[in-house]
Image (tube, rainbow, N blue to C red):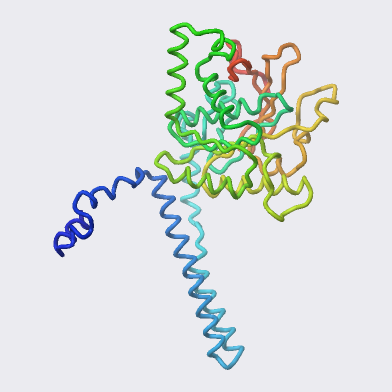
Amino acid sequence: MTVKNELQRTGKMEAAGGVGYVAGLLDGIPTVTPETLARWEKVVRDGAKLRRVKDAAAIMARVAEDTGNSADALDEARRLLDETERHVLSFDIDSAAGVREAHRNLLTPASEARGIRTGIPGLDRILRPSPAPGNVLIIAARPGGGKSAIAAQIAENVARSGKGVLFVSAEMTRSEIHERRILCESGLSVERIRRGLSLKDARALNEAVEAIAARPFYVIEGTPTPTEIRAQARMVAGRAHGLGVVVVDYLQLLAPAAGKFQTREGNVSETSRALKGLGGALSVPVVACCQLNRDVEKRENSEPRKSDLRESGSLEQDAHQILFLHRGEDSSERVIAVLGKNRNGAEGRTELRFRGEVFRFESPAHEGEGLAA
């Protein structure tokens, strides 16, 4: 309205494109929420700080040229640097406010917590607190252990809530991911679909397709670097729905940052740290699938443990929570989920049922309170 009134007052409305054009400028603006407002504020604030640093550096260069005495030039440079530091580096030192915020978080019911929910009752019971913004949840299993399926199911549950999902698939194509989503949502297997659908099944399939097509679920296929993932994540975060979670399937297959490390372990460690930094920078949880080494298959007790994480001990260090999956020996459907690390809560375990024909995990009817930790 301010722009329109000024253009009309100065007689420049037609030259600017007319009233319709000016009114249409609002169409491209995303919905303003406290989350998007906070992100935009950070962009503006960070830009201002960088400009202040550049200005101070230019002044220091001029002082060095104009001052005949090196000691005087150094003293003035120090003064400018101290002044710039006070403006650029700000810290939240209000301990009372921090304590009160922690108190509110502790009193927040699980259903209202800031973390993501998996949609699988037994799993949500042991993942307490639920993966929160900036946290890293590692899902670890041997090949075929179900880590991709459970990661996709978690991502789908976040997208179902209306939050954006960035799913990085280094193993499957975009089409394969979406096919699995359709099967999981509809509950119909490939065999059942190809055998011929009843009217009821056809309706369920169409409803599933329409439902998941409307959700903000974005897939990157291939092996991008952490820097490329961060760039894509920022793009999703900038949209009206925001970004609810970043899922990587799986971490050891990602391309390393150029020129960083020569060893495989070094590359995996750097990737792990980069994903943790991404979660902190964008204030979203990161779910990363990881493969376990073969040692777990050589032991008499085949239950995984943290030392079985393949190629890097830094994975254990960077993760806030580590969820191990392993198949029950008595059934291909029975999967034991073990929370082997929980930085802010208790460890635990639960039994899950895996319906492989539709790539869906469920809590068994008899699960109740789950297995004892």
Residue ID at (74%, 11%): 330
Depicted 297 relative to depicted 287: above or below: above
Count the marks: how many? 0
Residue 361 can be seen in this image: no
Q: Residue 14: x and y, percent?
A: 18, 57
- Which quadrant would the C terminus be assigned to in this image? top right
Residue 340 location (% of width, % of height): 70, 31
Asked if residue 10 is positioned above or below residue 138 in the image, the reply reads: below
Question: Farthest residue toward the top?
Answer: 198
**Most distant residue in the bottom direction:** 68
Q: Position of residue 107 (x, y in %)?
A: 47, 35
Observer-nearest residue: 282 or 132? 282
Which residue is found at the position 50% from the left and 53% from the top?
Answer: 95
Q: Nearer the viewer, residue 301 or 172?
A: 172
Question: Is there any visible trace of residue 52 in the rendered image?
Answer: yes
Position of residue 8 in the picture relative to residue 177 (left or right): left
Relative image position of residue 360 (x, y in whole percent): 58, 19
On the rendered structure, is 28 left or right of 59?
A: left
Q: Nearer the viewer, residue 305 or 26?
A: 26
Q: Is 120 positioned to the left or the right of 19 in the image? A: right
**Residue located 57% across and 38% down the image:** 220
Image-quadrant location for residue 224: top right
Q: Is residue 73 above or below residue 306?
A: below
Q: Is residue 121 above or below residue 230?
A: above
- Left or right of residue 217: residue 170: right
Residue nearer the viewer, 208 or 265: 208
Q: Residue at x 77, y 45 (%)?
A: 265
